[in-house]
Amino acid sequence: MADEQWSPDDIETLRSGLRGALPARVRMALDGYERFTGDEPPADAKGFAAWHAAAKAALAHVELLLKLVRWAEGRAETADPAETGIDRLLAQARAALTEFDDDPQEDE
């Protein structure tokens, strides 16, 4: 497989397939994140840390999907995260998780 060469047509076929499939995947990932973070985090430090790590991982997953969407659309990464609504949403979610980083529950 390492010797195989990708043609521009192959890349465009991949981009086209991703353009069709990714919007639904992004929506599913966001819905899952919203369901997960809608619950109260555990009160104990270990449970809270695990909940927090899982929420961060979910955001990273959404962010990766969005990078793939941009690539599939042939767009470069945006320099300003506030340029799109979804990027604003991710920034707000990260800020909310940062507030949890400072939560005294973690020190217990």
Image (cartoon, rainbow, N blue to C red):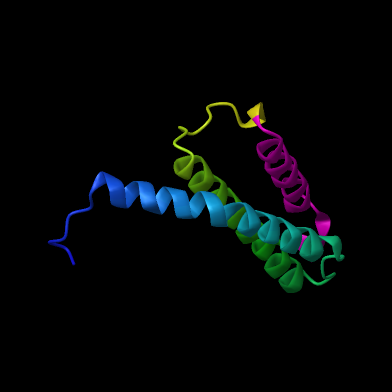
| Left-right relation of 75 to 63 | left
Q: Give the range drawn in magenta.
A: 84-108
Is residue 59 visible in this depiction of the protein?
A: no
The percent coordinates of residue 59 (x first, y second) are 64, 54
Q: Is 96 one of the magenta-colored residues?
A: yes
Q: In this view, does 35 lie above or below 27?
A: below
Is residue 97 visible in this depiction of the protein?
A: yes
Q: Residue drawn at (49%, 39%), measured in percent from left and top?
A: 73
Tell which of 4 and 46 is nearer to you.
4
Tell which of 66 and 100 is nearer to you.
66
Task: Residue 50: name its quadrant.
Answer: bottom right
Q: Residue drawn at (64%, 27%), measured in percent from left and top?
A: 83
The percent coordinates of residue 75 (x first, y second) are 47, 33
Task: Residue 47: name its quadrant.
Answer: bottom right
| Left-right relation of 31 to 57 | right
In the picture, the quarter occupied by the C terminus is bottom right
Q: Residue drawn at (86%, 66%), measured in percent from left and top?
A: 39
The percent coordinates of residue 35 (x first, y second) are 80, 64
Q: Residue drawn at (45%, 42%), measured in percent from left and top?
A: 71
Q: Which residue lies furthest to the left in this view?
A: 3
